[in-house]
């Protein structure tokens, strides 16, 4: 059974610092991995999607890497801003049907 | 594009009543919709997957007679929590997939906060 773990559970950094969020999964036979952002009491916003054949994806200040063999993904957020404060969730899917298995998330606070 | 809405955004009800939550895909046809539940400080747990015009597939441990799902059209799925109890209080989120790409990316709604008194 696939298990997705995110460490740390919470993170607080001053504005301008780079953020590093970790995600690990137990079964390396994934189809793809996604990173989402969730603001309090809100739904999910997709940030990056990495196909299993890819090593990384980039969008603006965000970069996500994927090491499928070791079951790890890392989300980097450069030059953090207070607006980056949110909970970040990673999720894997094992087939093209899109059934997502989520981690518990990392709650990020960026202080001005 | 790919906008999903949910209604209501929050609802408070008395124990024993039934509550219906709607999930709509606004600008695409959703062949598949997913319903998730999220308890405070926890991650999303998939409850069921529904395909338009067919019965929903429920995850292990989810009571199908308690959580009724109807996916009657390509733009609307409903989740009805029957005889709700305080332990059903949670954040319910739906997602929708068009099923037209190699990978059926899910687009998420804003969620519905259910509080059962």
Image (cartoon, coloured by chain):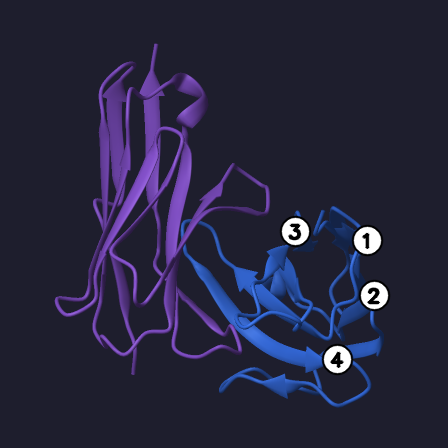
Chain colours: A purple, B blue
Residue at mark 2 shares a chain with residue at mark 1: yes
| Chain containing the residue with disc 4 | B
Real-space CA distance between mark 1 and mark 4, rounded to the nearest whole angstrom: 22 Å
Residue at mark 2 shares a chain with residue at mark 3: yes
Q: Nearer the viewer, mark 4 or mark 2?
A: 2
Viewport quadrant of the C terminus of chain A: top left
Q: Is residue A64 above or below residue B84?
A: above
What residue is pinned by disc 4? B68
Label 4 secondary element: strand
Q: Residue at x 83, y 65 (%)?
A: B75
On residue B111, the disc is 3
Circle 2 crowding by C-alpha within 10 Å: few under 14, some 14–19, many from 20: many
On residue B75, the disc is 2
Q: Is residue B81 above or below residue A6?
A: below
Real-space CA distance between mark 4 and mark 2, rounded to the nearest whole angstrom: 17 Å
Where residue B47 sits, quadrant-wise, is bottom right
Real-space CA distance between mark 4 and mark 3, rounded to the nearest whole angstrom: 17 Å
| Chain containing the residue with disc 2 | B
Can residue B18 be seen here? Answer: no
Mark 4 in CB contact with mark 2 (< 8 angstroms): no
Q: Earlier in the sequence, mark 3 or mark 1?
A: 1
Q: Nearer the viewer, mark 4 or mark 3?
A: 3
Circle 4 crowding by C-alpha within 10 Å: few under 14, some 14–19, many from 20: some
On residue B26, the disc is 1
Residue at mark 1 shares a chain with residue at mark 4: yes
Can residue A83 be seen here? Answer: yes
Real-space CA distance between mark 3 and mark 1, rounded to the nearest whole angstrom: 15 Å
The x and y percentages for residue B2 are: 70, 52
Mark 3 in CB contact with mark 1 (< 8 angstroms): no
| Chain containing the residue with disc 1 | B
Mark 2 in CB contact with mark 1 (< 8 angstroms): yes
Label 1 secondary element: loop
């Amino acid at each position: 059974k696939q298990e997705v773990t995110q460490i740390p559970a919470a993170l607080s950094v001053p504005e301008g610092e780079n953020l590093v969020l970790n995600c690990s999964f137990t079964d390396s036979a994934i189809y793809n991995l996604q990173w989402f952002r969730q603001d309090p009491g809100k739904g999910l916003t997709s940030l990056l999607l990495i196909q299993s054949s890819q090593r990384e994806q980039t969008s603006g200040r965000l970069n996500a890497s994927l090491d499928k063999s070791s079951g790890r993904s890392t989300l980097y957020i450069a030059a953090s801003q207070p607006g980056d404060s949110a909970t970040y969730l990673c999720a894997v899917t094992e087939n093209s049907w899109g059934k997502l298995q989520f981690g518990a998330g990392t709650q990020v606070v960026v202080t001005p | 594009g790919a906008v999903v809405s949910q209604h209501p955004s929050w609802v408070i009800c008395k124990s024993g009543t039934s509550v219906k939550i709607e999930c709509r895909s606004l600008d695409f046809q959703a062949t598949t919709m997913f319903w998730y539940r999220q308890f405070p400080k926890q991650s999303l747990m998939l409850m069921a997957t529904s395909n338009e015009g067919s019965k929903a597939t429920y995850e292990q441990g989810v009571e199908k007679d308690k959580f009724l799902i109807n996916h009657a059209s390509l733009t609307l799925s409903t989740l009805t929590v029957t005889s709700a109890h305080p332990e059903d209080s949670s954040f319910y989120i739906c997602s929708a997939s068009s099923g037209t790409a190699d990978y059926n990316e899910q687009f998420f709604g804003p969620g519905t906060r259910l509080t059962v008194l």
